[in-house]
Image (spheres, rainbow, N blue to C red):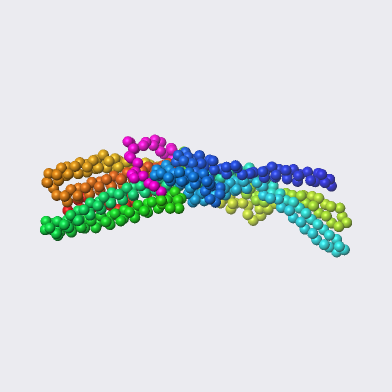
């Protein structure tokens, strides 16, 4: 037997295996695409931390942003570069790339060695080196499936980043509104204190009956409770914002008031199509279906042959010449003809198709709902700004003129001041709801369900009723 001829085929097979096994990791780990997708949807790009602690550049940038009062864009940037939970989710991208590289490489060859001793000190030694031929034949399909799953992991990482940005934006607006409401509730408390003290003095002087004095005292007690509740709500919202930003404490500075209402509600034409083109969960569902389709095709192609290995075999026996040859290992489909694997793959593919359709339907509905909520919140906030607050101000001015003319009492003037403050707090809450609804629409367009429509926060205490204390 010609040893050169015997070794020719295994050598060629080894060369093909080495060429097929040269898949390697990318320089950026696939994160550049994640950053670009996030930037398109939030205006800011995340930073991947490759060390257990944030880099000096990140710490310096966070310190720079925290040195002045935050705005919504600064909150988003801090969340994207500083949030440790987001960095933990980014690690899934590295895991997915490792799976992609593994899918592009052949399974390691198998080497077996056996040695037996017979009578008369005869020794028999067998050696074999086996290669996964089926893996080599299906390597292109496996690599393509791995690539699609890696793209799906990139979309998931971008979705996590967008979610962190939207959470930070909503938490920012809620925190600013909560602290602004505390200031107004404190004004109500100060007015209630003054009214109660004046009522007590007038009662002592005999100019005020007990019932009227008790009403003023009751209003003071209610105002104290509302101030305590609003203070607690502001602390909770500040801590929520600290968690959204990934900060160890809530010592950051916030602006004194929310951004003004825009001149008109921003238009967002083609919402349904935008959701189909940009929404990350829709794109993930599509990539998943494509990967499942590839897997189905591969399963059907290999339904009868699940194991096929080819290798070089060598045998040597004492006093006999060395023997060289081939060895083939093939799984025989005697009991399982691959029908179960094909049925499972077909069910998974059908499931993926239904999931794509369901995700698309929900995405369109959520975008329409979020847009309607934003428009409604804008109309309400504009009504407070253009009608309620100016009307309360006019009433206050008229009452001040009547007080100066001694037509009304100081208690009526104080009650009117409380009513005006209540109108302003209503506008603050409506303005907050608009900005949160706007963030929810961005979330619906970008990559995930925005959740329930924006409503008045349960943590925000209601202002005392207008005219209370009379």
Q: In this view, does 162 lie to the left or right of 460?
A: right
From the top left corner, tell me how far across and down residue 82 is, in percent. 48, 47
Q: Which residue is drawn at 85% across and 61% down?
A: 122
Q: Kindly give the residue lying farthest to the bottom in the view shown.
A: 119
Image location (x, y in percent) of residue 182: 31, 51
Residue at (71, 52) in percent of width and height = 110
Q: Residue at x 76, y 44 (%)?
A: 11
- Nearest the viewer among 368 and 349 is 368
Residue 441 coordinates in the image, percent (x, y): 39, 42
Main secondary structure found in the magenta portion: loop
Q: For residue 335, what is the image quadrant?
A: bottom right
Question: Would you say residue 6 is visible in this rendering?
Answer: yes
Query: Residue at coordinates 52% horizontally, 46% vertically from top-left?
Result: 56
Is 264 part of what is drawn in magenta? yes
The answer to whether residue 465 shows anywhere in this view is no
Q: Is residue 361 found inside the magenta-colored segment of the image?
A: no
Report whether 380 appears left or right of 438: left
Q: In front: 390, or 227?
A: 227
- In the rendered image, residue 241, in percent from the top left (x then y), is placed at 41, 50
Q: Give the range drawn in magenta.
A: 252-276
């Amino acid at each position: 037997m010609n040893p050169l001829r015997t070794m020719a085929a295994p050598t060629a097979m080894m060369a093909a295996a080495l060429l097929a096994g040269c898949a390697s990791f990318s320089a950026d780990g696939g994160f550049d695409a994640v950053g670009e997708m996030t930037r398109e949807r939030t205006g800011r790009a995340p930073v991947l931390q490759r060390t257990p602690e944030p880099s000096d550049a990140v710490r310096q940038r966070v310190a720079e942003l925290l040195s002045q009062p935050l705005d919504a864009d600064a909150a988003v940037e801090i969340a994207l570069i500083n949030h440790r939970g987001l960095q933990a989710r980014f690690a899934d991208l590295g895991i997915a790339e490792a799976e992609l590289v593994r899918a592009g490489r052949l399974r390691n060859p198998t080497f077996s060695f056996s040695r037996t001793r017979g009578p008369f000190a005869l020794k028999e030694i067998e050696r074999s080196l086996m290669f996964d031929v089926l893996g080599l034949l299906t390597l292109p399909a496996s690599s393509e499936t791995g690539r699609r799953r890696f793209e799906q992991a990139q979309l998931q990482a971008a979705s996590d980043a967008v979610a962190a940005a939207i959470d930070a934006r909503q938490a920012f607006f809620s925190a600013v509104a909560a602290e602004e409401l505390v200031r107004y509730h404190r004004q109500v408390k100060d007015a209630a204190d003054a009214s109660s003290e004046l009522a007590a003095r007038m009662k002592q002087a005999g100019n005020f009956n007990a019932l009227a004095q008790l009403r003023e005292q009751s209003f003071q007690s209610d105002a104290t409770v509302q101030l305590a509740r609003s203070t607690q709500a502001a602390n909770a919202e500040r801590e929520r914002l600290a968690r959204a930003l990934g900060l160890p404490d809530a010592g950051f500075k916030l602006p004194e008031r929310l951004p003004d209402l825009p001149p008109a509600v921003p238009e967002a034409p083609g919402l349904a199509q935008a959701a189909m083109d940009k929404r990350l969960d829709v794109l993930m569902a599509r990539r998943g279906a494509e990967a499942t389709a590839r897997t189905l095709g591969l399963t059907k192609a290999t339904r009868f042959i699940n194991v096929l290995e080819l290798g070089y075999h060598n045998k040597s026996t004492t006093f006999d010449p060395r023997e060289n040859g081939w060895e083939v290992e093939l799984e025989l489909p005697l009991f399982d003809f691959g029908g179960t694997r094909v049925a499972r793959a077909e069910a998974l593919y059908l499931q993926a198709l239904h999931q794509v359709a369901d995700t698309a339907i929900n995405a369109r509905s959520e975008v329409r709902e979020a847009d309607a909520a934003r428009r409604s919140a804008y109309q309400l906030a504009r009504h407070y700004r253009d009608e309620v607050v100016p009307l309360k101000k006019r009433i206050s001015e008229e009452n001040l003129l009547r007080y100066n003319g001694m037509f009304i009492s100081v208690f009526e003037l104080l009650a009117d001041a409380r009513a005006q403050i209540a109108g302003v707090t209503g506008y603050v809450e409506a303005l907050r709801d608009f900005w949160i609804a706007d963030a929810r629409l961005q979330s619906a367009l970008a990559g995930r369900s925005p959740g329930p429509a924006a409503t008045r926060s349960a943590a925000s205490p209601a202002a005392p009723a207008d005219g209370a204390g009379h």
